[in-house]
Each structure stands twice: as C-alpha cells, then as structure tokens.
Amino acid sequence: MLVLKISGHQLDDGAFLNRLARTVAAMPTPPVIVHGGGRGTTDLAARLGIESRFVEGLRVTDDAVRDVAVMGMVGTASMQLVQALVCAGVPALGLSGVDAGLVRVRKLEHHAGDLGWVGIPTEVAADRLQALLGAGFVPCLAPISLGEDGHIYNVNADHVAQAVASALHADALVFLTNVRGVMQDDRVLTHLTPSVAERLIAEGVIVGGMIPKVRAALAALQAGVRAVLMSDLDGVEAFLRGETAGTLVQADEEQQSTEGAAQ
Ligand SMILES: Nc1ncnc2c1ncn2[C@@H]1O[C@H](COP(=O)(O)OP(=O)(O)O)[C@@H](O)[C@H]1O
Ligand SMILES: CC(=O)N[C@@H](CCC(=O)OP(=O)(O)O)C(=O)O
C-alpha cells in the first residue's frame, strides 16, 4: 500500500488536479492520501490581513492563524482535491486528523522557540484507516489534528504523511511536491541519505518547506517504509510505472553498498 502526500502548491490548478486524479484512479491499489494546503492558507491569511510567518518550514500558528488554517485546509484544499478525485471516479473521503481521532498529536517543542498551535503526531488510528480502505473509500486527510490535550493543532502535512505511512506499514511513501526532487546546484539528487541530508540542511542547500519534508522522508525510512520518494507529478507517474525519478531516500549503508558494488 502507498501513502501519497499531495502538496498544496497546485490545488487551484484545474488541469493539474484532473491529471493527478486520473493518475490516482489508475493506481492498482487505492492509496491513502494526505494533503497540504500551505499556499492557499497563506493566500487566505493575506486576504484577511494576517501575515504568515514560518520557522524552518513550519507555520507559526496563533489562535487567528489556526482558524485560517482550518478554513484553508479542512475547507478549501480538501474540497478542491476531493472534488477532482470524485469526478475521476475515485471514492475519496475528505477527512482531517480530527475525524474519528485518526491523528493525535502533542505540541511541538521547537528549538527556535514557541510556534503556537503546531503539533507533531504521536499516534495514528491505523485500524480505522484500514477499515475505511476495506470499505472501499480513499481517505484524504487534511493535516489539522487533535491534541492529546483536546485542542486543535495545525500539523505540517509532511509530518502527518510520515506518521500515517509508518503506522500503516506502507510499502511506499510518495511526497508529490512542486519541484522535481531535492536539488543541489540546479541538479536533482537521485538519492539522498541521512548524513547527506543533514549536511545539506546545515549548509543551507535544503531550506524552508524542504526541511520538514526531508526529515519526514528520513523518519519514514527509519520506521521501515521501503520506498520514499520526493518528486513532482511527472516523477510520481514515472515511479508508479516502475521507473526511476525524483529523489529517493536511502539509508547510509545502502548508499555505501551501491557505491561498493559500482567500484
Ligand atoms: N534543496 C532544495 N531542493 C528543492 N526544493 C527546495 C530545496 N530547498 C528548499 N526548497 C523549496 O522547498 C519547496 C517545497 O516545500 P514546500 O513549499 O513546503 O512544499 P510542499 O507543499 O510540497 O510541502 C520547493 O518549492 C522549494 O522552493
Ligand atoms: C505547521 C505547519 O507548517 N502546517 C502547514 C500545514 C499545511 C502544509 O503542510 O501544506 P503543504 O504540504 O502544502 O506545505 C501549514 O500551515 O502550512
């Protein structure tokens, strides 16, 4: 089973959505979907006169921003995606992490300071997601989730996707984003190991929203998800055809044995 994380970058692009929906409809095994909505939420906040602030790719979320995040992600983003999927014949069910207690979180303690209502997943109700899959639905999760303290939290969608893929023991986790993969000097890195990733973060090559994505990808690999890909839609479609594309994360030892075999 595959967990597909869909970025919020292109959810207002009808042609993109229709192509994506056709790709999902053609998948032999229905995926579990986690979507973002960061860009739409930032746009909505601006229209409401609220400035958006991010720390290492995570949105600083006070009370007002949390309200906007709920509107942007459980509302607009979910509706845009589910509409396209259902039109393509996919029985998509738009949910958030709050519904049925699917994703529980605790407040994220960040080294850079207090980010407000930002959560980090602690538990995923894998049995309930399996029940939805078993009943023929394709769950589409917005990343707003319920705290162990009963409060509503804004959670980075990459973190939710990682937690869901790990809890479901998914075979693959695919991060569909708006770039071809993790880039260095205008080149896509075909493979990324934990040690290289941390070096590129420290050197400022991997910045902003790519930081939580890369860390989530590494955590999924660590949790036993065998294939973890970061790519755009071209790359995701190639990956589903069994071709190489985008950036695959790989354990350090795996990289060494590949290099060893090549010598
Ligand atoms: N080294 C890098 N390679 C590719 N993209 C990067 C890199 N560092 C930062 N980015 C930025 O990260 C963005 C993806 O993160 P984000 O905007 O949070 O996307 P998503 O919606 O997929 O979570 C890219 O659009 C790019 O601007
Ligand atoms: C805490 C935090 O950063 N939450 C994110 C959740 C949405 C998200 O991750 O959307 P993308 O996948 O489109 O970037 C946010 O508010 O933007």
Image (spheres, helix red, strand yellow):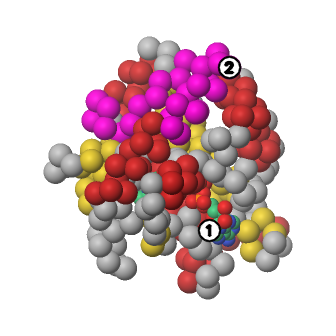
In-image side of 92 versus 24 (left or right):
left
In-image side of 240 versus 198 (left or right):
right
Residue 81 belongs to the span the image colors magenta: yes
In-image side of 209 versus 156 (left or right):
right
- The secondary structure type at the circle numbered 1 is loop
**Which quadrant does ligand 1 occupy?**
bottom right
Q: Residue furthest left?
A: 149
Q: Quadrant of residue 55?
A: bottom left
| Magenta part of the chain | 76-101
Residue 219: x %, y % from top left: 47, 59
* Residue occupying image coordinates x 47% and y 45%: 72
The amino acid sitting under disc 1 is Thr
Q: Residues within 10 Å of mark 1 (few under 14, many from 20)?
A: some
- The secondary structure type at the circle numbered 2 is loop
The amino acid sitting under disc 2 is Ala
Q: CA distance from mark 1 to mark 2?
A: 36 Å
Residue 60: x %, y % from top left: 39, 66
Residue at mark 1: 193
Location of the C terminus by quadrant is bottom right
Question: Which numbered disc flags the more N-terminal residue, 1 or 2?
Answer: 2
Residue 215: x %, y % from top left: 51, 64
Location of the N terminus by quadrant is top right
Q: Is residue 88 above or below residue 175?
A: above
Residue at mark 2: 88
